[in-house]
Amino acid sequence: MIEIYSDEYFMRQALLQAELAREKDEVPVGAVIVCDKKIIARAHNLTNRLNDVTAHAEMQAFTSAAEYLGGKYLNKCTLYVTLEPCIMCAGAAYWTRIAKVVYGASDPNRGYARIETNLLHPKTKILHGIMQKECSAILLDFFQKKRMD
């Protein structure tokens, strides 16, 4: 049983968002932003639907959370995302001053960690590998099916 308000609980919520993306034939990445143990933003990739290369799950979540809070800084919030943020999303996370980033699957090709600089804010805590198997599986399944089409 997963403890409510745990990293696993919130990552499961991000995975539900990834499922919504997959149903829309988007790359299945999901994100939620949590503040005071409450989900204040839910998002998934919308790059195809919006015809916008910047419409990553994280970017959608940042916008939604900022709107909810009435300000651009998320310094009391945690981002849960199923895939390691790309350089663009890590840069946006920096500007939000988000307190913590938790991601599931690593992205050795496009993830922010592949470059030798820290794009996240110096005060941002990072936790990775939460539900890595499940987060990786949804992506692998999606791209395997794409290759078969």
Image (tube, rainbow, N blue to C red):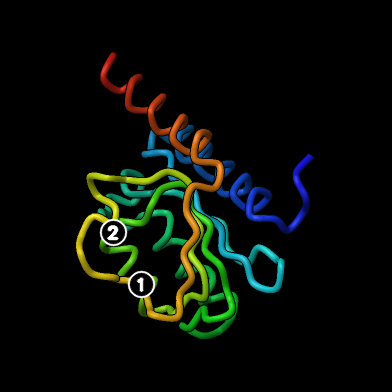
Q: Residue at x 58, y 79 (%)?
A: 76
For numbered disc 1, what is the local secondary structure? loop
Residue 100 position, x and y percent, is: 51, 69
Q: Residue at x 39, y 71 (%)?
A: 93
Q: Residues within 10 Å of mark 1 (few under 14, many from 20)?
A: many
Q: Work out whether mark 1 precedes mark 2 in sequence or the reverse, and give the earlier one.
A: 2
For numbered disc 2, what is the local secondary structure? helix
**What residue type is disc 2 on?**
Tyr
**Front residue (pair 44, 137):** 137
**What residue type is disc 1 on?**
Leu
Instruction: Tell me the residue that label 1 is attached to.
Output: 120
Residue 61 position, x and y percent, is: 48, 63
Q: Are marks 1 and 2 in contact (CB under 8 Å)?
A: yes
Q: Measured along the vertical axis of the image, is residue 74 above or below residue 4? A: below
Q: Measured along the vertical axis of the image, is residue 88 above or below residue 15? A: below
Q: Measured along the vertical axis of the image, is residue 74 above or below residue 139? A: below
User: Which residue occupies the extreme front position in the image?
Assistant: 116
Q: Residues within 10 Å of mark 2 (few under 14, many from 20)?
A: many
**Quadrant assignment for the N terminus:** top right
Residue 48 position, x and y percent, is: 31, 44
Which of the labelled discs sits on residue 14, or is there none?
none
The answer to whether residue 50 is left or right of residue 72 is: left
Instruction: Tell me the residue that label 2 is attached to.
Output: 112
Q: Residue at x 26, y 61 (%)?
A: 87
**Front residue (pair 44, 51):** 44
Q: How far is the residue under mark 1 from the one under mark 2?
A: 9 Å
**Front residue (pair 43, 94):** 94
Residue 50 position, x and y percent, is: 33, 51
Count of numbered labels shown in the rendering: 2
Q: Residue at x 45, y 75 (%)?
A: 124
